[in-house]
Image: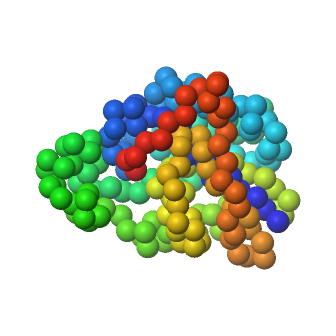
């Protein structure tokens, strides 16, 4: 079986400001870089054979900081975060002022990418990764909270929030994907755990 650990990137500068990111491309914050470095000991124990990343800077930076010596992260653009449409770049306060009542009613703004659209690009990308790996591979994929939680919903598990440098194992068995355990790679004594609410 092939094992994939999908990991949410470290805190970005927009995470720190409470801004919805979507396809926007802010870098990791100084704390986000510390989180990724602090995850090193946990990553070293995983026995990774490959590392992949979304094409967005915050995920690429995370993958580069997490990759063990000798492994170069491969960039897979379809694993980028959900497009959040007209909420991109806004804080919750700004969203509530410009789109009153929409968040409370669980409504999405124009341009917001649906779960179905997100899965239509993420699942083939994961299939492509799995097809390239040997059956006993262990791979880390630096991606985004929206991708991980939507995948969990798709596979039948109501998802709680994902912290930065937290993630979920996926097990590929006989051409099917199964959910494994949640994992947090950062010891809070080494770097603060952060739980951004925005995608």
Quarter occupied by the N terminus = bottom right
Residue 31 falls left or right of residue 197: right
Q: Quadrant of residue 156?
A: bottom right
Pick whichever, 181 or 23, lies toward us: 181
Q: Point out residue 160 in the picture as x, y percentages from the top left corner.
A: 51, 56
Q: Residue at x 52, y 61 (%)?
A: 159
Q: Quadrant of residue 135?
A: bottom right
Q: Point out residue 6 in the picture as x, y percentages from the top left corner.
A: 63, 52
Which color scheme is applied?
Answer: rainbow
Q: Point out residue 187 in the picture as x, y percentages from the top left corner.
A: 66, 32
Q: Residue at x 26, y 57 (%)?
A: 103
Q: Quadrant of residue 188?
A: top right
* Residue 74 visible in the snapshot: no
Residue 25 falls left or right of residue 109: right
Q: Residue at x 59, y 26 (%)?
A: 191
Q: Point out residue 95 in the picture as x, y percentages from the top left corner.
A: 21, 49
């Amino acid at each position: 079986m092939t094992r994939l650990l999908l990991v949410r990137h470290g805190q970005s500068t927009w995470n720190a400001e409470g801004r919805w990111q979507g396809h926007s491309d802010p870098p990791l914050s100084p704390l986000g870089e510390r989180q990724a470095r602090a995850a090193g000991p946990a990553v070293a124990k995983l026995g990774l054979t490959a590392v992949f990343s979304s094409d967005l800077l915050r995920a690429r930076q995370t993958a580069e900081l997490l990759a063990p010596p000798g492994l170069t992260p491969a960039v897979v653009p379809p694993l980028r975060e959900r497009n959040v449409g007209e909420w991109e770049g806004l804080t919750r306060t700004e969203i509530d002022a410009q789109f009153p009542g929409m968040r409370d009613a669980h409504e999405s703004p124009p341009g917001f990418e649906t779960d179905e659209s997100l899965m239509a690009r993420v699942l083939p990308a994961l299939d492509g990764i799995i097809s390239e790996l040997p059956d006993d591979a262990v791979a880390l994929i630096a991606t985004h909270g929206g991708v991980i939680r939507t995948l969990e919903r798709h596979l039948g598990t109501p998802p709680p929030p994902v912290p930065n440098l937290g993630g979920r194992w996926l097990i590929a068995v006989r051409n099917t994907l199964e959910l494994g355990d949640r994992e947090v790679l950062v010891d809070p004594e080494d770097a603060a755990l952060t739980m951004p609410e925005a995608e």
